[in-house]
Image (cartoon, rainbow, N blue to C red):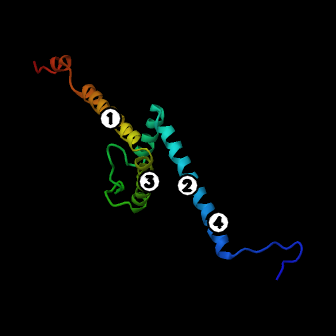
Amino acid sequence: MWPERGCPVRSDPQTIDESKQNKLRKEEKLKDELERVDLQQILALPAGRRVMYRLIEMTGCGVVNTDPQRVDEAGRSDTHHTYFAIGELAIGERIKLDMLTLAPELYSTMMMEASTRVAEQIRRDAMSSSPTDDDQLEDGDA
């Protein structure tokens, strides 16, 4: 049967589905590639690595991981804050997974730089809190 004038010719539904699926696959590949390139460009910059590290650190997924268990002032478990912290951890883990998957070398660089910053901060804190020779003389220890 011939189509009437003005009516589009209908294709086989399976062919339409396959072409739509192919188009969606191509779009998904382009999206994935763009995300990979974007993340690599961010992590290629020292400032970008610091920002991304701060993001995962805020979620408790940095060099020093935090326990999501929260307690209130009386020492009781605070489930609302605990669940909130678990959600933050999930976000941080997703960001880390993306970085590890899409830019593993740059992720390693970021974590080494962060470890160095943390170690330097610990050293500065220790030096500022340790008593000096003058402090010991004033206390009569010498």
Left of 7 or right of it: where is 58? left
Q: Which mark is residue 20?
A: 4
Q: Are marks 1 and 4 in contact (CB under 8 Å)?
A: no
Q: Secondary structure at mark 1?
A: helix
Label 1 crowd (10 A; few <14 / some 14-19 / many >=20): some
**Disc with the residue nearer the chain's start (2 vs 4):** 4
**Disc with the residue nearer the chain's start (3 vs 2):** 2
Q: Which residue is mark 1?
A: 118
Front-most of residues 10 and 59: 10
Give the CA separation, mark 2 to mark 4: 14 Å
Left of 17 or right of it: where is 66? left
Q: Are marks 3 and 4 in contact (CB under 8 Å)?
A: no
Q: Amino acid at mark 3?
A: Arg
Which label lies toward us, 3 or 4?
4
- Give the percent coordinates (x, y) of residue 25: 57, 60
- Give the percent coordinates (x, y) of residue 15: 65, 72
Q: Amino acid at mark 4?
A: Lys
Front-most of residues 122 and 45: 45
Give the CA separation, mark 2 to mark 1: 38 Å
Label 4 crowd (10 A; few <14 / some 14-19 / many >=20): few
**Disc with the residue nearer the chain's start (1 vs 4):** 4
Q: Which residue is mark 3?
A: 94
Q: Amino acid at mark 1?
A: Val
Give the CA separation, mark 3 to mark 2: 19 Å
Q: Which mark is residue 101?
A: none
